[in-house]
Amino acid sequence: MTRAIDALQTGFLSPEQIAASHAIMGLDTQLIEDGTYLVAEKDGVLAGCGGWSRRATLYGSDQSEGLRDPKLLDPASDPARIRAMYTHPDFARQGIGRLILRKCEAAAASHGFSAVELMATLSGERLYASCGFILIEHVETIAGGVAVPLVRMRKTLNSSD
């Protein structure tokens, strides 16, 4: 996760913003406890990870103060959340993130959700858009006094997804 944040945000964020990102990104053990976190291995190496959630938290890691909300969502009216998506830099742009995303969407749909929502980094926005997510809004989160830009996105799940 640390390597992904440091390497894949380069060119999108300043060094100060990348450093600040570590305060809001990283491990999310709620997904692990809920059994909704996936990992992808390639050639015996952890290549990527990501999960989906039926909880209200939209983004943020275990150490993200003020961003966590464990409330359960209602699949009839709320979108599931896609969270904590990371690809090891050595495996970027090889389909790892897309694979995990598809599996998360399918799992959310199997639990009755008709839409998913996520908070994308600037480096991840292109992937999510190519997978059918649409822009909801551009936001900034302040971490350590530094503004980190993020993109809220949503996708309606079709029965064929």
Image (cartoon, rainbow, N blue to C red):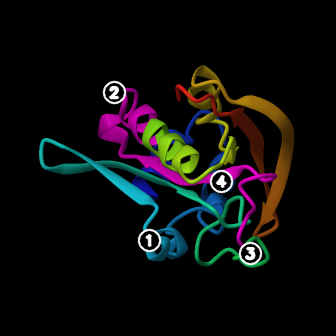
Residue that mark 3 sits on: 71
Q: Earlier in the sequence, mark 4 or mark 1?
A: 1
Q: Are marks 4 and 1 in contact (CB under 8 Å)?
A: no
Which residue type carries mark 4? Arg
Q: Position of residue 80 (x, y in %)?
A: 66, 53
| Label 1 neighbour load within 10 Å: few <14, some 14-19, many 20+ | few
Mark 1 vs mark 2, foreground winner is 1
Which residue type carries mark 3? Lys
SS at mark 4 in the image: strand
The span shown in magenta is: 71-100
Residue that mark 4 sits on: 81
Q: Position of residue 3 (x, y in %)?
A: 41, 53
Residue that mark 2 sits on: 94
Could you give the CA–CA distance between mark 3 and mark 1, rounded to whole angstroms?
Answer: 16 Å
Q: Residue at x 74, y 75 (%)?
A: 71
Quarter of the image where one finds residue 141: bottom right
Q: Earlier in the sequence, mark 3 or mark 2?
A: 3
Which residue type carries mark 1? Ile
Q: Position of residue 87 (x, y in %)?
A: 40, 44
Residue that mark 1 sits on: 32
